[in-house]
Structures are given as C-alpha cells and as structure tokens.
Amino acid sequence: MNEKKNIKTICEAISKHKLIQFKYKGLPKVVEPYLIGEHEDNGNIVLRAFSVGGKSKSTNVLGWKFYDLTHIVELTIRIEDIKIKKDYNPNDRDISRIICRI
C-alpha cells in the first residue's frame, strides 16, 4: 500500500526537518511537514503541514493544512530545511493518535 510508504517517507522528512512535495488530488503541493497521525473525526491518517507553495482549489495556498495520506502521490523529500513555526502545536487536538512529529 502506498500509504505505508508515504508515512515512512514523511516521517523521515519530519525527523530531518526537510520540505516535501507531492500531488494532492491532482494539484502540486510544497509543504513543511510537522505531524502524521489519526484524525479525531474520521480516523484517517493525515499529515499536518504548513503549505508554502503549489496550487490550491481554494484561494489560500499558504497556511496550516491537513492532507489525507490516501490522496498523496508522487511524494519526494526536498533539500530545503524548514524553520519550525512558532505557532506549531505538537499536541494537536484534532489528532487522536500520533505516528510521528517534530
């Protein structure tokens, strides 16, 4: 399953504080990955990340987002380091079980 491979790759990027890029529902994304876990509402495995580039169906590309791992394809770790955002909350209330995090 692609989701397990994505979890491993994203957790590696999180541990190294690296940007990642991927396609999400057909749109390119560049994000700072912070946390992977089980979403409180539906139990889906999600990535909590800060979007820094790419395209979005909404008008706001930048900012904190959730990405359901089942929709992430063409995932790669980039060479750029991330600077941890001051407003990052490692104890995200929307996550019931954490898999990996900064």
Image: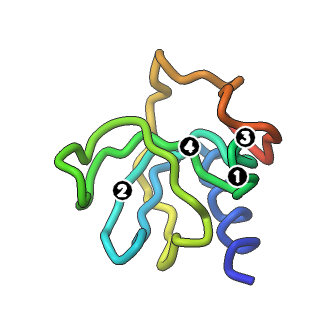
Residue type highlighted by circle 4? Arg
- Residue at the image position 47 percent from the left and 16 percent from the top: 86
Q: Viewed as shown, does residue 48 lie left or right of 61?
A: right
- Closer to the N terminus: mark 2 or mark 4? 2
Residue type highlighted by circle 1? Asn
- In what element is the residue under mark 3? loop
* Discs 3/4, front: 3
* Discs 2/3, front: 3
Tell me if label 3 and label 4 are in contact, CB under 8 Å.
no
* Discs 2/4, front: 4
Q: Where, quadrant-wise, is the N terminus in this rendering? A: bottom right
Distance from the alpha carbon under mark 2 to that under mark 1: 25 Å
Q: Which residue is more in the foreground, 85 or 1? A: 1
Q: Which residue is mark 2?
A: 30
The vertical placement of 5 against 88, above or below, is below
Q: Which residue is mark 4?
A: 48
- Residue at the image position 51 percent from the left and 47 percent from the top: 66
Q: Which residue is mark 1?
A: 42
